[in-house]
């Protein structure tokens, strides 16, 4: 499996920041199979090519780690850049800082993302392959959310959301349109419901409700497939380590062929 050079170096856990990684590459201190590479996005297979830094061969961590986080409000699911720090943003990675070995901490990635104002179930791991398999839309992994809305939920809205609605995104003049996949709606009340979806496009649930004339005021992920946050008794901001076998049993219970 190919990986970008900067991602490989980040996972190795020997650098203290992304800037240190970039400078090492741009300064010509990294070689791949004997050749200096100054392109941070250079792709290669680390199982077939050697990476050398300061006369030392680098390698990826051998033992993958898996964590379940009850994501709190006000945290983003990426590592902070300088502008975000100036704005006072908070990252979910801060919740892990100092609690794990440096190599593990530097290798962590989120399995998909929850937006800043969404809380709940979030897998965090060093295992990029597993992350891709869970987030790949083709595998149709179901995620379930508790939702509250600002307006009353009408029967027409329920019917439209269940069938799939047209979503139009205008991103800096670039327009994208798509139809959301059908969803499963349960425990429907005047201003709340449980929604299950097997797609994970950016801010999709909020956009689904906006498209039918409503707005999400609270969004909390409850589970991924059969793996439920409630079973782990985690308060907001807390995480626990879980086993790969648990993920296979609870998430890929009827589709282990994708692993």
Image (spheres, rainbow, N blue to C red):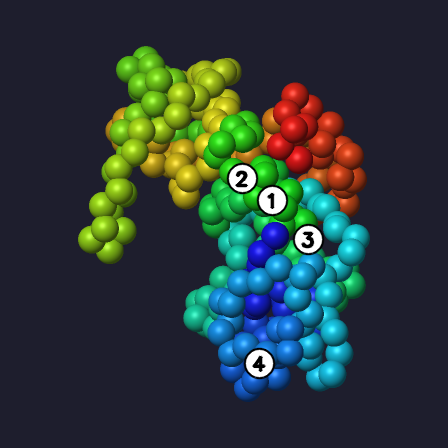
| Residue on which disc 4 sits | 36
Task: Indicate the quadrant where residue 134 lies.
Answer: top right
Q: Check disc 3 and report its element: helix, strand or loop.
A: loop
For disc 1, the marked residue is 131
Of the image marks 1 and 3, the number of the one nearer the N terminus: 3
Name the disc covering residue 135, or none: 2
Residue sitting nearer the eye, 174 or 5: 5
- Relative to 216, residue 87 above or below: below
In the image, residue 148 sits, relative to residue 242, either above or below, namely: above
> Mark 3 or mark 4, which is nearer to you?
4
Q: For numbered disc 2, what is the local secondary structure?
A: helix
| Quarter location, residue 249 | top right
Question: Number of callouts in the render?
Answer: 4
Spatial CA span between label 2 and label 4: 34 Å
Label located before the other in sequence (3 or 4): 4
Checking the image for residue 126, the label placed there is: 3
- Whole-Å distance between the Cαs marked 1 and 3? 9 Å
Q: Is residue 156 left or right of residue 120?
A: left
The image quarter containing residue 167 is top left
* Left or right: 162 as drawn, with respect to 6: left
Report the residue at 68% width, 53% height from top: 126
| Marks 1 & 2, CB-CB < 8 Å contact | yes
Tell whether 230 sits left or right of 182: right
Of callouts 2 and 3, the N-terminal one: 3
For marks 2 and 4 on the same chain, the one whose residue lies earlier in the sequence: 4
Labels 4 and 1: the sequence-earlier one: 4
Residue 119 at x, y = what percent?
55, 41
């Amino acid at each position: 499996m190919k990986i970008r050079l900067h991602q490989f170096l980040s996972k190795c856990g020997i650098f203290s920041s992304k800037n240190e990684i970039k400078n090492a590459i741009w300064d010509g201190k990294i070689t791949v199979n004997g050749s200096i590479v100054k392109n941070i996005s250079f792709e290669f297979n680390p199982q077939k090519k050697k990476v050398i830094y300061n006369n030392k061969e680098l390698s990826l961590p051998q033992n993958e780690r898996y964590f379940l986080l009850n994501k709190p409000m006000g945290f983003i699911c990426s590592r902070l850049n300088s502008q975000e720090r100036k704005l006072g943003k908070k990252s979910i990675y801060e919740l892990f800082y100092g609690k794990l070995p440096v190599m593990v901490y530097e290798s962590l990635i989120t399995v998909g993302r929850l937006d800043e104002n969404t809380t709940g179930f979030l897998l965090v791991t060093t295992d990029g392959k597993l992350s891709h398999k869970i987030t790949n839309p083709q595998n149709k992994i179901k995620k379930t959310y508790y939702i509250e809305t600002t307006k009353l939920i009408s029967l027409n809205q329920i019917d439209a959301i269940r069938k799939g609605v047209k979503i139009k995104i205008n991103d800096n003049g670039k327009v994208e349109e798509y139809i959301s996949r059908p969803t499963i709606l349960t425990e429907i009340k005047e201003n709340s419901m449980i929604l299950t979806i097997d797609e994970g496009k950016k801010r999709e649930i909020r956009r689904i409700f906006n498209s039918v004339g409503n707005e999400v005021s609270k969004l909390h992920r409850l589970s991924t497939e059969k793996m439920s946050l409630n079973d782990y008794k985690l308060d907001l901001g807390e995480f626990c380590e879980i086993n790969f076998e648990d993920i296979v049993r609870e998430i890929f219970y009827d589709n282990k062929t994708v692993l």
